[in-house]
Image (cartoon, helix red, strand yellow):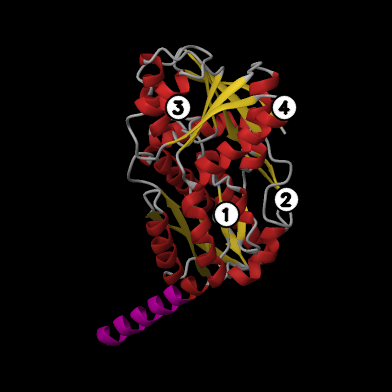
Amino acid sequence: MQVKLNAVVSAAALLIAGAASAQEVVVKIGHVGPTSGGIAHLGKDNENGARMAIDELNAKGVTIGGKKAKFELLAEDDAGDPKQGTAVAQKLVDSKVNGVIGHLNSGTTIPASKIYSDAGIPQISPSATNPKYTRNGYKTAFRVVADDAQLGGTLGRYAVKELKAKSVAVIDDRTAYGQGVAEEFAKSVKASGGTIAEQQFTTDKATDFTAILTAIKAKNPDVVFYGGMDAVAGPMIRQMKQLGINAKFMGGDGICSGELPKLAAGAMADGQVVCAEAGGVDDSGKPALEKFKADFKKKFGADVQIYAPYVYDATMVMADAMVRAGSADPAKYLPALAKTNYKGVTGNIAFDEKGDIKNGALTLYTYKGGNKQAMRVVR
């Protein structure tokens, strides 16, 4: 009798468990960034932004199509390398993810976007700024930050109009991001009446810039612009000081990190560096962003570097589209994602027909006393 009773109880337990699982939908969100290599601190910052959003969504008990959603983060490392980027993109497709947040770099985001497009999986990049990313006609590609045309253009105008630079030297690291933002900057300098006195190239792995900086010093420019990431920009600023180059140093969001002063090892003069970050909030949006930064530090024991708030918003935007569509099926929620109108910690997010953010903001920053300081938000 006891055996029969146990069997009945076990069967009932299985039925209850089955009913519970039938009422639950597992949503796999892929995240890709360079969590190894020279800019691993930026990749980890991004991954933590995604993790924060996933944890909050699960804590809220979000329902999609009447079923409780259980969000899972599948985090991958592309090391900032295009080949590794496409390999992990395929891995996520094979894992049947419902959507992807990433990649961080334009050089990995652009080749990976074809793989996601072919699989019909929506992708939101929180930080890839090369315009080509959304110019390939892929309906699955979105981004939540302004692109290099806006970023480089704004910095170029600022160099000539505000810093009164007459001659400018431009260096880029030959990556899709670095070259793209440097080209837009140079174009804007010329259009604003400035002169490109010298153009030099390096790589995203270089550590010695003596030859290119010596060539630049001979031209005595007012501004040196670097298209690339902070891991290279820091040592470059240090070597500029050693060579006695006192020009202003400018760059895009790739150099605009909290780590830059450490990477420059004390070589930065107050106000010497001017950089722009793709994104930014006006005064009304500051309380929400500051709260996010405080919560982030409490959760991870680290300050936000650059992109974590945009990754967080991108993840929330993807989940919001699923809720509105009543489905986590990529084909079903993709149309809802295209019609997004979401108020995030980085401001309002809506996409144009290409998948670019509408009315994207930029924030200009400088550094004083080793600390990053916002100067102004421009649109």
What residue did someone put label 4 on? 192
Q: Answer yes or no: do the residues labelled 2 and 3 have beta carbons within 8 Å?
A: no
Q: Is residue 28 visible?
A: yes
The amino acid sitting under disc 3 is Gly
Image quarter of residue 244: top left
Mark 2 to mark 4 CA distance (whole Å):
35 Å
Q: Which residues are magenta?
A: 1-18
Label 4 is placed on what type of residue?
Ser
Q: Earlier in the sequence, mark 2 or mark 4?
A: 4
What residue lies at 39% left-to-right and 59% top-to-bottom?
A: 83
- Kind of residue indicated by mark 2: Asn
Residue 159, percent from left and from top: 63, 22
Whole-angstrom CA distance, mark 1 to mark 3, is 24 Å
Q: Which residue is mark 3?
A: 258
| Category of crowding for the residue at label 1, using alpha-carbon neighbours closer than 10 angstroms: few (below 14), some (14–19), many (at least 20) | many
**Left or right: where 57 falls relative to 74:** right
- Say what secondary structure mark 1 lies in: strand
Task: From the image, tell me which residue sits under label 1.
Answer: 124
* Mark in front: 3 vs 4: 4
Instruction: State the residue at coordinates (63%, 64%).
Output: 138
Q: Secondary structure at mark 4?
A: loop
In contact (CB < 8 Å): disc 1 and disc 4: no
